[in-house]
Amino acid sequence: MPSFVRFFQYPVPLDERERWLRYLVQSYQTTMNDLGVETWIMHGTLIGWYRNRKILPFDHDGDVQMTEESLSWLADHHNATIHAFRSHERTYLLDINPQHVKDSLEDVNNPVDGRWIDTSNGMWLDITSVRPHPGPAEQEEPVLRTKFGHQYAIGDIYPLQKTDFEGVPTLVPAKAEELLVRQYGEGILTQTAYKGYRWDPKTKLWVKDQA
């Protein structure tokens, strides 16, 4: 049973979800910074960073990556640890999947290598690791691959860019915009309406449509 299930509260109140997800990314990044672990945001979380350095208010979880070496170190030294944040009045569980050591796309039940879990409600950030794999025959440079099957050239990720996200020092991939377009299409950088929210270009915020 996934660890977040024992903490999960359903339904998560919509008016609270954005704040709790913000707390998740702030607490995770602060902890990783304190531990000296190199990690970066990806996927929907990276979209939020690109638009306004904030989480997407309609998102349900978050996505971060790190190298397999960093993940193994966390597994060895900090797995199943609880981290308290008085400013949030919450605690968070770092849960590393023991199957992270298996490098196979066929293990469809274990593509997520770890989670950062809010113990108050079960919301989480997915942690996936990247590791080198041989690239296509015509490409000399190896690729970085996750167990979800996402592949990146090393130059897509490195050198990581120093930035901030939800007010906390954060890293993003070298070619963040290019990766987003590749994964989601050209419109992802300029989309103005999604899931009952609209983009306000003046405030640079997603605003919920009025019922």
Image (cartoon, rainbow, N blue to C red):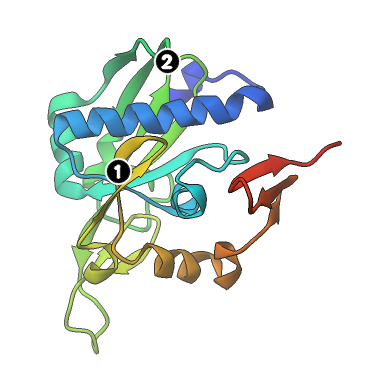
In the rendered view, tell whether residue 195 sits above or below residue 190: above
> Residue 77: x and y, percent?
13, 27
The residue lying furthest to the front in this view is 202
Instruction: Name the quadrant of the N terminus.
Output: top left
Question: Which of these two is toward me, 50 or 75?
Answer: 50
Q: Residue drawn at (66%, 51%), measured in percent from left and top?
A: 199
The kind of secondary structure element at disc 1 is strand
Q: Is residue 52 left or right of residue 165?
A: right
Q: Give percent across and percent down for residue 65.
A: 31, 48
Q: Position of residue 10 (x, y in %)?
A: 64, 21
Residue ID for mark 2: 88
Q: Secondary structure at mark 2?
A: loop
Foreground residue among 32 and 71: 32
At label 1, counting other C-alpha atoms closer than 10 Å, the crowd grade (few under 14, some 14-19, many 20 or more) is many
Could you tell whether 6 is left or right of 116 in the image?
right
Query: Closest to the observer: 167 or 72?
Result: 167
Q: Residues within 10 Å of mark 2 (few under 14, many from 20)?
A: few
Q: Which residue is mark 1?
A: 170
Measured from the top left, where is residue 30 in percent x and y?
A: 28, 29
Seen from the viewer's position, the closer of residues 202 and 174 is 202
